[in-house]
Amino acid sequence: MPTDDEPRDFIRRKVYEDVRSGKHGGKVMTRFPPEPNGYLHIGHAKAICLDFGVAEEFGGKCNLRFDDTNPTREETEYVEAIKEDIRWLGYYWEDRLYFASDYFGKMYEYAERLVEMGKAFVCDLSPEEVREYRGTLTEPGRNSPYRNRTPEENLDLLRRMKAGEFPEGSRTLRAKIDMAHPNMNMRDPAIYRILHRSHHRTGDEWCIYPMYDYAHCLEDSIEGITHSLCTLEFEDNRPLYDWFLDQLDVFHPQQIEFARLNLTYTVLSKRKLSRLVENGVVDGWDDPRMPTLSGIRRRGYTAESIRSFVDKVGVAKRESTVDVGLLEHCVREDLNRRATRYMAVLDPLKVVIEDYPEDGEDWLDFVNNPEDESAGTRKVPFSREIYVNRKDFMMEPPRKFYRLSPGREVRLRYAYYIRCEDVVTDREGNVVELRCSHDPESRGGSTPDGRKVRGTLHWVSARHAVTVEARLYDRLFGIPNPMKAPEGGTFMDNLNPDSLRVLPEVPAEPALASLGPEDLIQLERIGYFHVDPQRSREGYPVLNMTVALRDSWAKIEKKLSGHGK
RNA sequence: UGGCGAGUCGUCCAAUGGUAGGACAGCGGACUCUGGAUCCGCCAAUCGGGGUUCGAAUCCCUGCUCGCCAGCCA
């Protein structure tokens, strides 16, 4: 329980006050209630961190409960994937794994009770008729002609519904509230519908299934949930949540709503995400470009960075869209601390050190992680022919360009100072090779004379290089709000065509060949990468770019070209 | 023209009658063997109009804007 500082948001403040005032004996119990019909995404991470976090902070517990009340769309496959995602995020439900379907019996008993109390009735209206009778936002609805059936008749009908005597969709059990209520949810909402479907857990035991509003409040009540946290769109459902619990006179949790997470350059809805998968825009639910937890994980995001992100985003009731840049900041922050540094050259340009012995070789000390001294050093091979990045050379450098150009001296990271003596071009004038000299005094990366060299380049010894694959990812959508579609278009029209670039033959230092699966690394001066557990093969790691390093040269470059024109 | 909810720097979150603060982004600088990291600084906001008060982002009135709700989905 937070001691010195005040609760961080309105939910924690409410819980804090309830605990202090002794409500529920000062106990806190929450739940994370996913429907097992799809994969979890970063938006769910916010809910998970809130549900589990609040419980943890106030000495309570959080249940994992699958809200499986609709057999037409739920599957066991999702149950396992969801459990894995939550575990990965670092939250534990211990032995508190529940299913709404565990309570079907109890819920049915309660339904009979409502019928006996005259608070629910069996309605024979068709779905179309129900819609007509419901009225509109501005006009009241009309009572169902079946609304006045006696409790005895209703009970008999309900039992026969349960026994499977009626076809799917022919009848419903409805709450008897008020067809003129300004809140549509209170206009005699359905409690049970007939569905002759096998359920992933209860099989064919049931052919009537409870609706969300009826089921959810009872699930919470049965589990003794004190604070039932959900998103804003359920605000209108709260009166109904309370109504059922009041009628039944059972333990009454409090539902509290908060704004769901939205992200720029991203879509976060199962429907839209599945459209990306179905249309082959991405490789699957765990494509590293997907905002699903499995995708993000494969991309190389750490659980810690997600939790830190959720923490920074905060919780409120205002609908908002968080800059995806904040997420990127959070991974960089975490990865900077923990990623081992390596060198690889994405766009190689050959450099020959002319005054270096033909078959010479040198193993130089490379700092594994400047942020973590305990990570130590390793040896990296150097030789006469190396690769540097093509963009680190310019024939005619603009102002403030500190890298290689004719006659210019730069440092090779942890190796030598080299000077560009000559440039080899092909017929079209393309630079194909650089001829350089080196200063033997500069071995390791500095000279006794203390001379200043501004540019430091990463490099790979050609003779020693191993080959890796690099997969460079960019935002899936090209504009901040993908939903802002052109006339007659959809969010699919806003896809970024360059969201994936594959470089199958990247020369890299030898150490990269022996990376373990799921290693988190930094390729110096490029970005953070994650060894793809599915695509990598022995000796040929496939590196997913998690996020690029901040690139202030790119900014300067942009500004220079902007002013130049 | 029904009900519910929300409006604070570009973005996200604080301040709950007493100096509008933090984070990200942006801009400038220092430092640096990653143009990374780090450090310092700067820019930048209370939806409008009335009112109450010594004092209002906060309370009252009024207007405006945005979101959600008419599944036998959750």
Image (spheres, coloured by chain):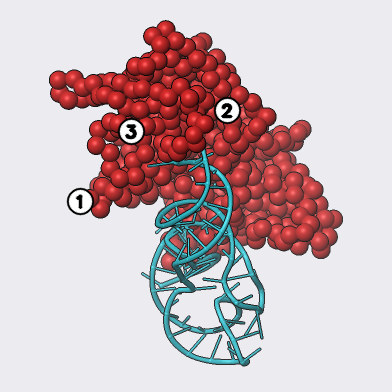
Q: Residues within 10 Å of mark 3 (few under 14, many from 20)?
A: some
Residue at which label 1 appears: A565
Q: Are marks 3 and 1 in contact (CB under 8 Å)?
A: no
Residue in the foreground of this view, choosing between A59 and A334: A334
Q: Secondary structure at mark 2?
A: strand
Question: Residue at horizontal 53%, vertical 16%?
Answer: A363
The colour assigned to chain A within the rendered structure = red
- Asked if residue A118 lies left or right of residue A544, the reply is right
How far apart are labels 3 and 1 at the CA level?
A: 27 Å
Q: What secondary structure is found at the residue carrying circle 1?
A: loop
Above or below, comparing residue B48 to residue A380 in the picture: below
Instruction: State which tag comes first along the sequence, 3 or 1.
Output: 3
Residue extending farthest to the left is A427
Choose between A315 and A347: the one closer to the eye: A347
User: Could you classify mark 1 by the number of other residues whose Cα lies within 10 Å: few (under 14), some (14-19), or many (20 or more)?
Assistant: few
Q: Nearer the viewer, mark 2 or mark 3?
A: 3
Q: Earlier in the sequence, mark 1 or mark 2?
A: 2
Q: CA distance from mark 1 to mark 2?
A: 42 Å
Q: Which residue is mark 3?
A: A408
